[in-house]
Image (spheres, helix red, strand yellow):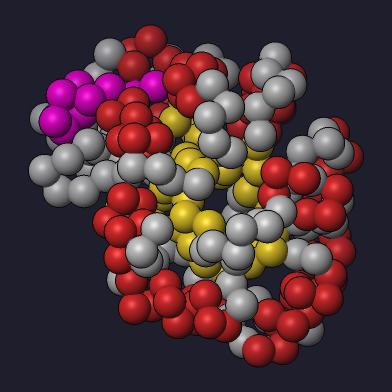
């Protein structure tokens, strides 16, 4: 599956697509991957929302980036997310008075206002994530994971859901085989992996390129000039204004 078979992935406007990376968040504002960050992303007019999913000990997909709670917990509580039940994790106070939501709750909040890129942090979470998504057939979902094997499983288990090739390194000669292995609709590289040859390969295949994580408008403009289709940014509103949108 590529973007030609996923109408909502097409970028007919020609604008650089702005994904709110873990929602819109910043120092003094909402905390990443929380209801506040996702509401702000919608208010700021983000073109899509990116979020991260870990599985709790009792099998609930939770929207949280780290493997442990230490960095974001208000009091530094250091729990391993995979070892704790969802109710306990969701009752843990995070910095700024936020809490951990479930994937189902965030999708209910977004209500298909914009596409959602669900990044699966642990391959073991894939079946539970797909079950949540099965109950929301109208949601515009893009799946991604650094666990490429999980995305290959998703290709066969849920072929209707577009998938991204998400990587932070690419051995020589591995790029096109990886795209083919996933039948990827998009490629999500860090900027260091972009080369004219890889951009051309994506364009020839109808594979969009969305780069992470870009908070500098000058860099965003440079990427747009190279033919990149979108970026992941922590501050969607600031980026929209800087790009004159």
Going 62% across and 87% down the picture, which residue do you hit? 195
Indicate the position of residue 91 as horizontal and vertical percent values: 28, 13
- Report whether 69 appears left or right of 157: left
- Tell me what residue is drawn at x 86 percent, y 39 percent: 159
User: Where is residue 151 drawn, in percent x and y?
Assistant: 74, 47
Residue placed most toward the observer, 225 or 26: 225
Residue 220: name its quadrant. bottom left
> Would residue 168 be seen by someone viewing this image from the given angle?
no
Residue in view at x 77 percent, y 38 percent: 161
Q: Which residues are magenta?
A: 93-103
Left or right: 228 as drawn, with respect to 222: right
Say which residue appears at 54% left-offset and 62% top-offset: 15
Q: Nearer the viewer, residue 198 or 3?
A: 3
As drawn, 193 above or below 68: below
Whether the magenta-drawn stretch holds residue 77 is answered as no
Residue 152 lies, in percent from the top left, at 80, 49
Classify residue 137 as left or right of residue 95: right
Q: Quadrant of residue 24?
A: top left
- One can see residue 220 in this view: yes
Task: Quadrant for the C terminus, please.
Answer: bottom left
Seen as rendered, the residue at the extreme top is 87
Q: Nearer the viewer, residue 134 or 44?
A: 44
Q: Main secondary structure of the magenta part?
A: loop
The image quadrant that residue 179 belongs to is: bottom right
Magenta stretch holds residue 97: yes
Which x, y percent locates residue 157?
85, 33
């Amino acid at each position: 599956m590529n973007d030609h078979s996923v109408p909502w992935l097409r970028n007919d406007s020609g604008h650089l697509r702005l994904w709110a990376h873990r929602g819109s968040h910043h120092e003094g504002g909402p905390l990443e991957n929380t209801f506040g960050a996702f509401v702000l992303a919608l208010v700021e007019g983000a073109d899509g929302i990116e979020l991260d999913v870990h599985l709790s000990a009792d099998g609930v997909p939770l929207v949280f980036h780290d493997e442990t709670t230490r960095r974001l917990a208000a009091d530094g509580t250091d729990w391993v997310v995979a070892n704790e039940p969802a109710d306990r994790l969701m009752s843990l106070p995070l910095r700024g008075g936020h809490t951990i939501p479930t994937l189902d709750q965030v999708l209910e909040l977004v209500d298909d206002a914009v596409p959602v890129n669900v990044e699966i942090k642990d391959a073991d979470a894939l079946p539970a994530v797909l079950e949540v998504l099965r109950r929301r057939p109208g949601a515009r979902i893009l799946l991604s994971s650094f666990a490429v094997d999980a995305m290959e499983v998703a290709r066969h288990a849920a072929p209707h859901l577009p998938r991204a090739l998400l990587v932070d390194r690419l051995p020589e000669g591995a790029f096109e085989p990886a795209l083919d292995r996933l039948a990827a609709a998009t490629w999500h590289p860090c900027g260091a992996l972009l080369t004219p040859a890889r951009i051309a390969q994506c364009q020839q295949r109808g594979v969009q390129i969305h780069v992470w994580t870009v908070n500098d408008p000058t860099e965003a403009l440079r990427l747009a000039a190279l033919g990149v289709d979108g970026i992941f940014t922590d501050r969607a509103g600031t980026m929209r204004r800087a790009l004159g949108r």
